[in-house]
Amino acid sequence: MDLRTLRYFAVTAEELNITHAAERLNISQPPLSNQIKALEEELGVTLFIRGKRRLKLTEAGTLLYRRAVQLLELAERTRQEISSMEGLTGTLNIGLVEGRAPFLAARWIAGFRGEYPSVKFRLWNGSGDEVLDRVYHGLADVALIAAPYDTEHLEGFPVGREPWVALMSKSNPLAQEPGNFLPLEKLVGQPLIVPSRASRISAIISWFEEVGAEPYILCELSNYLDAEALAEQDVGVCIFPQTTYNQSDLVVSKVITQSERQVEYALVWNKNQHNSELAAEFINYVQDCLDEEKNQRQKYRMPEHEYIPPEGTRLL
């Protein structure tokens, strides 16, 4: 007497009609009749009085029906409890901008997946404006973007920072400058490739005003791979946030100094939409990671070779 047979019996007892019970169970009538007969033979009792059109439960059948309902409910409750032990389930939609964002997200996903193995992820990359548009329209549960962001409609917190660098061809004379740093004044007069975000262009113009110059902006773009490709061909010098990509051997990267600038990344979500349990748990997990980073500076810190802007570095 297994659970499937009990379910067949219970449905038949509720319908009191083999044809209707078979339709409800989505099986044909003969197998159902055979299952009921086999159950009666196993128990050594008659469960139904068979009429021309309807069935009638015997006393033994009535008792078995009560017990079957209890057993089936207990089995379902047990299944749900066991499933809940697996933790959170579902798919988390994450929007990401270029730069360090994918590497930060990958680290959190790896740790989060270790705690909640049933959770799945859907990542979407794009420019800052494109990613934020997905957050506003509910297509991304959370997003990792570069500050600043709209605090009126978004809630979030900073998660990392990196310096602005100059990417250039190995054949560019500036690539021959000693060291891994380059004063901003060295970029005056150079054809520049810059991020297309309007706020970024405005900030870069203000940055150059500090050295009494106006930037020569040749090209605007939003994709790091485009920046690297153009720099490799010596189309110009690209001003872009430093990333952990493996750069081409034909491209040189130098941190821009005098004065330094940094970009700050933030994890954000739509404050006007209710967070799912999954999104809320992921946000809490990231916050815990950041707290552990502050306390331990070991498990979550960036690799030693990466340049981290000093405290007090101004944002761009």
Image (tube, rainbow, N blue to C red):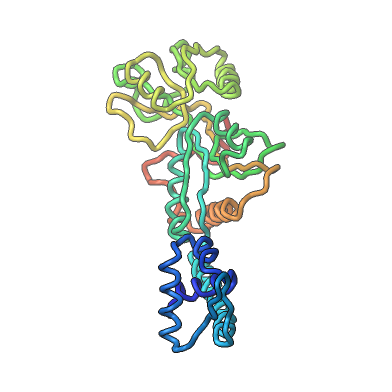
Identity of the residue drawn at 37% across and 24% down: 228
Q: How many marks?
A: 0
Q: Quadrant of the C terminus?
A: top right
Viewer-side residue, 312 vs 301:
301
Viewer-side residue, 56 vs 266:
56
Viewer-side residue, 134 vs 253:
134
Q: Residue furthest left?
A: 249
Left or right: residue 281 versus residue 153 is left
Identity of the residue drawn at 59% across and 81% down: 66
Above or below, 152 relative to 191: below
Viewer-side residue, 260 vs 104:
104
Above or below, 272 relative to 131: below
Q: Residue furthest front?
A: 52
Q: Position of residue 313 (x, y in %)?
A: 55, 35
Image quarter of residue 63: bottom right
Left or right: residue 70 versus residue 4 is right
Q: Position of residue 285 (x, y in %)?
A: 54, 55
Q: Position of residue 101 (x, y in %)?
A: 48, 39
Image quarter of residue 147: top right
Q: Position of residue 288 (x, y in %)?
A: 55, 57
Q: Quadrant of the N terminus?
A: bottom left
Identity of the residue drawn at 45% across and 69% down: 32
